[in-house]
Each structure stands twice: as C-alpha cells, then as structure tokens.
Amino acid sequence: MRKLAKLITVLLSVVMVLTMMASARTADAVVFADFDTAGDLRVGTQFPNSPLWLNFANNTKLSIVDKALKVEFEPDGNFGIGNPTVNLRAENGEPTYKYLVIRIKGEKGNENRTAVGGLIISIGGAEGSHMRPLNDREVGVAIPALDRNGNVMPAITTQFQNFVIPLTKENVRPTGNAISINFNYVMNKGTIYIDDIYLTNTYPSDADEYKPTKAPTTKATEKTAGGAVTTKADTTKQNTTAPSSAADTTAEQTEPTGYSDVDTGTTKDVTPSTVNSATTANTGSSSDGGISVGAMIAIVIGIMVVVGGGLVALYFLVIRKKVS
C-alpha cells in the first residue's frame, strides 16, 4: 500500500508540474489580470486584493470560479476591466508591448465561431476602429484579430488556450488612457472563462494558433484565355480539368468558359463553345497530336530543296554533257 501511495504522489506531482508549465507566463510578462482571488464583483469597484477594476457590465454576469473569471453573456452582453498600473500605449502612440495574451476557454466550445455577430475585444477600451473580433471573420465593419502569421484566432474550446494578439497602432486604442480591455458578445448568448491576461515582448512558447486546413474563400485574380486579368469569386463555376498549356485551350468545349463579373454580377464568355481549325493554326500546334503548320512548311521546303538539287545535278551531269 505504501508503494502505491508513493506512486500516486509522484504521478500527482508530475501532473501538477506539467500543468504549471503549460500555463506559465513568459519571463517578461506584465500581468493585466489574473483573477486569483475570490470575492464579490461589483461595477465601479476593484477586484478583491487586485489593482483591477470592473468598469462596467451590461447583460453580463461575472464571477470568480476556480481562479478564473466566469463570464455569462446574454445577447449583446459586454463588460470592461481596467488596470491603472498598466498602459497599453506609450506617449508616442506606439504599443507599449508586442503581444497581448489571453488565456480563455468556453463552456461549450466554438463561442467565437458563431453564424452571426461574434466576440469582440477592445484593446485599450472605448469603441472605434481598433476593435477586433476573436472570430474567423468580420463582425460588422470590425476586422478580425490576427496572429503573427496573419491567421485568425483559433476556435475556443472547452480547454484553456492562449490567444496571442500582436499589438499594433491599429488595434490599440489610439487616444485617451489605454488602460482597459473590453469584451462584447454581439448578437449571441454564451459563457466563457478567462484565466489570465498579460502583456509581453516575448512570443509565448505555449501560444495556440489557428491552423488553416484549406485555402481562404476570398476573391482571386487570374488571367483569362485572352490574356485579360479578371477578378473571380470562388463560387463561380469552374472547369473540372484545368488547361495544361496554351495549346490545350484550343480543344473543343461543350459549353462556354465563363468568369464572374464582380462589378455587374453577370457572366461573360471568354472562349466560344466550339473552336475551329483556324484557332489551332494560330497556336502553331494542334490539340489532337497532328502535324503542326510549321512542321508541314518545313517538310514542303525540304522536298523543294531535294527536288531542286536533283534538277541541278541532272542538268550538269546529263543535259549539259550532251550539249557540249
């Protein structure tokens, strides 16, 4: 029994160490909020034993659960917290730190993958163009927060993850005291947990990043058969077999190849439904493996050279000899 008890103790110690390592801050971290203390939360007052203030909370219930801030949003709920000891922007307008790290999880998961609306963060407080959704798309006119690789934030799961947002002049409040961080759950209802918020100049080794699994569904630019550049939406009809070379574009088609006219919403034909032999002649080769026009000309010239040379030889060897 003693050996079993020792083994259990060792295993628990290892789990605790791994847990501490997984949630460790960077060495130069400046804590904005950690929610390690328990107590009642009231708007306009400080968090218990903390420099953090609860600035406002609308349609939102806040509480401390297991050293994390539990946030229960009603539709369009929002809240703001401020730390007067931490300024997110320097006097010259530049962000004071390189990264904002938010350790977050959801009650159900995918709280930032809603069909409408979304979870928006205001870094520095107030409203304005610096507001950023943590979703994978725009929310209204607000563009999503991006990581250092230019990708959106990962989907919230039921396990804590470190969302790392590089701070720029564009996503930090440009005026006033940038000492607050606000959250707004637009057009949605749900519950999230925030365990830690800190600032750092070192990219965290335990950062959670979004891993794209497919090409983004955005407008792309490509050349048509005539050489003109057009903008095409990814939802337009595509040929199932892409041409492998210029010669392939002369093969017969059963229907027109079209592209989306983004300005008018109409569809224009790029190539006719049937291509005749004149098109093949213009390409210098045929699509069905026949002899090209250039090759045919070369053969005719070769025949003419051979016949001409034979006639000249015949003249010198036979006709001229008889005349002399």
Image (spheres, rainbow, N blue to C red):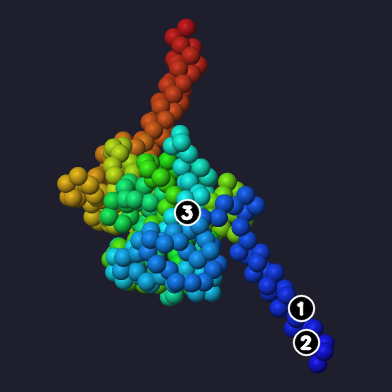
Residue 205 visible in image: yes
- Where is mark 1, residue-wise? 10
Position above or below: 116 against 263: below
Q: Quadrant of residue 79?
A: bottom left
Q: Which badge, 2 or 1, is on the more N-terminal residue?
A: 2
Q: Nearer the viewer, mark 2 or mark 3?
A: 3
Which numbered marker is on residue 5? 2
Q: Give neighbour class at mark 2: few <14, some 14-19, many 20+ (Cα, 10 Å).
A: few
Question: In the image, what residue occupies the spot 50% across and 49% down?
Answer: 86
Q: Amino acid at mark 1?
A: Val
Q: Amino acid at mark 2?
A: Ala
Question: In the image, what residue occupies the spot 16% across and 46% down?
Answer: 264
User: Is 178 or 117 nearer to us in this picture?
Assistant: 178
Q: Which badge, 3 or 1, is on the more N-terminal residue?
A: 1
Q: Position of residue 51 (x, y in %)?
A: 50, 57
Query: Spatial distance from mark 2 to mark 3, Cα to Cα?
Result: 45 Å
- Where is mark 3, residue-wise? 83
Query: Spatial distance from mark 2 to mark 1, Cα to Cα?
Result: 9 Å
Q: Which badge, 2 or 3, is on the more N-terminal residue?
A: 2
Residue 44 appears left or right of 203: left
Q: Are marks 3 and 1 in contact (CB under 8 Å)?
A: no
Q: Quadrant of residue 263?
A: top left
Q: Amino acid at mark 3?
A: Asn
